[in-house]
Image (cartoon, grey):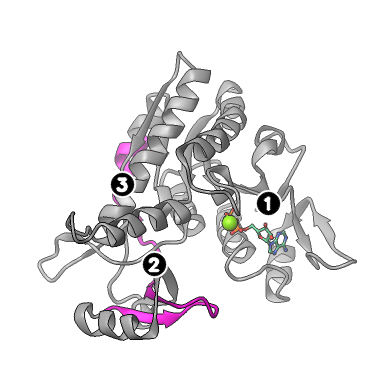
Amino acid sequence: MRQRVVLALGGNAILQPGQEGTFENQKANIEVSAESISKIIKAGHELVIVHGNGPQVGQILRQNELAKEEVPVQPLPICSAESQGFIGYMLQESLKNRLPEKNVATVLTMTEVDLADKAFNNPTKPIGSFYTEEESNQLAEEKGWVMGEDAGRGYRRLVASPEPKGIVEVNVIKTMLENDIVVVSTGGGGIPVARNEKGNLEGVAAVIDKDSSALRLSQDVESDVLMILTDVPNVYINYGKPDQEKLETISIEKAEQYYGEGHFSDGSMGPKMAACIEFAKLGKTAIICSLTEAVEALEGNAGTRIVG
Ligand code: ADP
Ligand code: MG
């Protein structure tokens, strides 16, 4: 049966931890990702691909920082758009080579956030270069940046991570799906925009969790499945402990119980499980699995499934 699938690619789909962010490394990882994704498309499903952009947008920010005497520095929403563009291109090329008969296109996607979101009162996400304490104080004064110490490695700019309220291009994405186009969208969680005093959309310095945005998108395009592809084959309870246990098919109630018991770490599995639980509440199936087992997981033969 043809299903509409929103698939979120984890960071490792583009760059593995510890790898240098060269074009060649990223392209090699994307080839592996495209191989797995193309099996879902060949199986006849409608597909929207969401991806992370942490290391990539970090690299663009760093380039801006290093070249600032020569080239005007661009704000964060522009860097976010740039990363969506080049990651989208790499995915399009790798997918098109495997599926010459298919139309594949990237939509630069804005994700609307609310300036009243409480996340803006307490920015927590470090972005861009590391600075000394002195530089950090100067930047806070000159640019009004919120700065914070990052795990003993130096000072960095901190930005908010607000909740995604809506995907601005949702109707474009739906139209593309209805016309059998494979869509890459909402990369890096989307370019964060908010309504200003005049009621117009305007880019904001923030980062949006890609798993939360993938949930928002799957709700808005009314997908049948939300799939989150990451670097572990399953979700586990007691993860990393001798008594760790693989989860295969679980109910919303079980998932919420384990969530409440703290089995899923805040910055990694936590947001994925939170997104999957919300999606399952629509009476649908959410899947977390490894990048290479996507089609098997969609058929019910791999990964962790939360069923509503
Ligand atoms: P991505 O880049 O795919 O979003 P993350 O690093 O954010 O990946 O999340 C995946 C990681 O979550 C895994 O590599 C694993 O170390 C971690 N993790 C934390 N808790 C769990 C759990 N209960 N079960 C499986 N993985 C977990
Ligand atoms: Mg990661």
Q: Is residue 59 above or below residue 183?
A: below
Please tell me in which quarter of the rendered image ligand 2 is found.
bottom right
Please provide percent x and percent y for residue 146.
33, 80
The residue most toward the right is 242
Q: Amino acid at mark 1?
A: Val
> Where is residue 296, by image quadrant?
top right
Q: Residue at x 61, y 26 (%)?
A: 39
Please provide percent x and percent y for residue 179.
37, 24
- Say which residue label 3 marks: 82
Please provide percent x and percent y for residue 292.
68, 37
Q: Is 254 colored magenta in this rendering?
A: no
Q: Which is nearer the N-term, disc 3 or disc 1?
A: 3
Q: How many marks?
A: 3
Label 3 neighbour load within 10 Å: few <14, some 14-19, many 20+: some
- Say which residue label 1 marks: 307
Disc 2/disc 3 C-alpha distance (Å): 18 Å
The residue most toward the left is 198
Q: Secondary structure at mark 3?
A: helix
Q: Residue at x 53, y 35 (%)?
A: 30
Checking the image for residue 129, the label placed there is 2
Disc 3/disc 1 C-alpha distance (Å): 36 Å
**Which contiguous range is marked in magenta?**
145-174
Q: Amino acid at mark 2?
A: Ser
Q: Is 153 colored magenta in this rendering?
A: yes
**Is residue 110 shown to the viewer in this render?**
no
Disc 2/disc 1 C-alpha distance (Å): 41 Å
The answer to whether 269 appears left or right of 70 in the picture is right
